[in-house]
Image (spheres, helix red, strand yellow):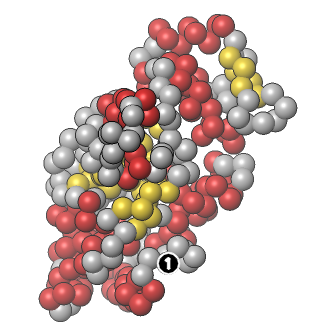
Amino acid sequence: MGLFCEGDKPDEFVIEPRVASINALDPNRAELAFLRRIPLQYRHSARKYFYRFYYGYENIADPYKILWIDPKKIEYVTSADSKVDTTMGSDISDSITYDMDRGRFSKVRIGSIKHGDWDKEMIRFDDLYLPQAVEEHYQNGVPWEETEFFQRYKRYLEFGNKAYGVNNYQEFVNFFPEYIHNIYENMLYEGYNTNKLSPDVSLEKKGAKEYEGSGQESDKIFQHIAINIGRNGKFLFNNSEGHHRLSIARILDIDVVPVSVIVRHHEWQKTRDQYAHSNRDHHASTHEDLVSEE
């Protein structure tokens, strides 16, 4: 085995010389080859060793570090690209946003650093059908069933798909308005309450325990809006956790929301390293991903 854990401590790893052979692989294959040697419960901790060993990066973020950012700064979504785990919107029978190709990284990649063009800004978050419907309903009084979001879900369910735990459009009509209004009222009267799991998170928690040895850290992934950071430091919605909360936070003008960073672009990681080596007294930054390291 090329890499093993000493004393059952995830922060202590020994890399045998033959692991250097992974340098012959392209970056994504090299990372997979490296992590395949690691027990699942240690993979998040092991990633930082890979990035130091393979790329020489130093200022690698804690994957569970929560950033507090203005929701209005999440202007764009992650784009479809060969490096993402899931491409969304390519098939009319398989997506309500079949005319909006988007990308999503798996939750288990939290803390990853990746190349690719997934950060090219093509689709605005506000152009997605859910935030449009939230704005139309709560700010303009448009009935839910008259929104494009509902009409798309009607077609989606008619293709035999399931959504929100329902099997047909009438069940969706009965379920969704109350579901999202609970989120809206909680955020309206309590702000972004991190002590409560929002309804759109609770459905997702099941998968966490299958990946992490300890549910404590993995719970943090599911409590917050999932984003990625592009090469220039732009915050990009990951098209996964937090879709409803982000939509509502933006129309309620909530000042800041907590986010979990799933993936950072390699070029942005270089900026993080440069910032770590700079004289911070003379190179002050207001970027949340840099300020959080001070």
Q: Amino acid at mark 1?
A: Asn
The structure residue drawn at horizontal position 72% and vertical position 49%, both measured from the top left corner, is: 213
- Can residue 175 be seen in the rendering of this structure? no
138 sits to left or right of 216: left
Image position, residue 216 (x, y; %): 68, 59
Query: Considering only vertical position in the picture, is 130 above or below 186?
Result: above
The structure residue drawn at horizontal position 19% and vertical position 73%, both measured from the top left corner, is: 132
Image position, residue 27 (x, y; %): 43, 21
Q: Quadrant of the N terminus?
A: top right
293 sits to left or right of 118: right
The structure residue drawn at horizontal position 38% and vertical position 31%, both measured from the top left corner, is: 278
Query: Considering only vertical position in the picture, is 17 above or below 62?
Result: above
- Can residue 291 be seen in the rendering of this structure? yes
Image position, residue 153 (x, y; %): 28, 72
Viewer-side residue, 80 vs 63: 63
Q: Which residue is mark 1?
A: 193
